[in-house]
Image: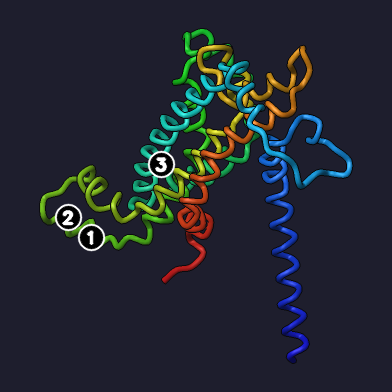
Amino acid sequence: MRTDKLAIGLGKTVAVAVILVWSLFPITFILMSSFKPGQDIFAVPPKFVFSPTIQHYVELWNGWGVFFGGLLNSTIITAGATVLAITTSTAAGYVYSRYSSRMLNASVMFLIIVRLIPPIVVTLPLFPIINAIGLNDTHIVLMVLYATFFVSLGTVLMRTFIDQIPRELDEAAQIDGAGRLTILRRVIVPLAAPGILAVAVFVVVFAWNEFLFAFIFTATRAKTAPLVISEMIGSIDGVDWGVLFAASTVQLIPVLLFVIFMNRYLVAGLTAGATKG
């Protein structure tokens, strides 16, 4: 029995170690390479001991000012998409939680199906429409597209969280004269805050790293950081890997810190509805 427990424990340890190496190796490689001298980045055998340099970051600042403009665009678009997505998802989740009808029940399945559709299927038909109404290469078009893409998942998550809030609280607020909007704002939103934060994490990670929509619907004014990084790869002067890794590190750190800080809410979102009490 003791041998079996040791074997199981060892197996779990090995599995966790493999997952950590698989997940952290690309991030570690990018981070280390951004501080390596150019000749050491792809040295064989790899150099783990080297003299760090910030030259690649200096070259990024001096030669790729457009990248920092892209970071600003990414920040604006991500913030706008997150606010729009959580506002819409919270309101829709409240309706799905507190009301029931055949149409509403059927539309839940529709939301799930829509979420499974590849983005490219809806992206290309949208391009002439967006272009015709003059929203191409604007922040607002990406905000709306990113929020729309995650409203379905956000609504399902928020309904699950709001289902856990007793309806008696709604009824008590109604007795005190509160309307539906007041109940949503003063009762539901504070209690469903973990769910709102979980949805925010999903939207932020998606919007910050998204490339396809940005590639199709932006050109110069609303160009995001991932799009600028792709231009570094396709540069006619060749790829400066040190600068590329420096840009990737700068683009990665904010969202990585955000996910680490919000980790417990992300876990709550992934396990929402797993148990009922």
Residue picked out by circle 1: 169
Location of the C terminus by quadrant is bottom left
Residue at (11, 54) in percent of width and height: 176
- Residue 75 point in image, percent of width and height: 46, 29
In the displayed structure image, the side of residue 263 where residue 188 appears, left or right: left
Q: Amino acid at mark 2?
A: Ala
Marks 2/1: CA–CA distance: 6 Å
Do callouts 2 and 3 mark residues in contact (Cβ within 8 Å)? no
Q: Amino acid at mark 1?
A: Leu
Residue at (41, 29) in percent of width and height: 80
Residue at (72, 36) in percent of width and height: 36
Residue picked out by circle 3: 89
Q: Residue furthest left?
A: 176
Q: Helix or strand or loop: what does disc 1 sit on?
A: helix
Residue 218 vertical position relative to residue 16 in the rendered view, above or below: above
What colouring style does the render use? rainbow
In the displayed structure image, the side of residue 178 where residue 187 appears, left or right: right
Do callouts 2 and 1 mark residues in contact (Cβ within 8 Å)? yes
Do we see residue 110 in this rendering?
A: no
Q: Helix or strand or loop: what does disc 3 sit on?
A: helix
Marks 1/3: CA–CA distance: 21 Å
Location of the N terminus by quadrant is bottom right
Residue 7 vertical position relative to residue 86 in the rendered view, above or below: below
- Residue 143 point in image, percent of width and height: 46, 26
State which tag comes first along the sequence, 2 or 3: 3
Residue picked out by circle 2: 173
The residue carrying pointer 1 sits among few (fewer than 14), some (14 to 19) or many (20 or more) residues within 10 Å by Cα, namely few
State which tag comes first along the sequence, 1 or 3: 3
- Residue 14 point in image, percent of width and height: 75, 67
Q: Amino acid at mark 3?
A: Ser
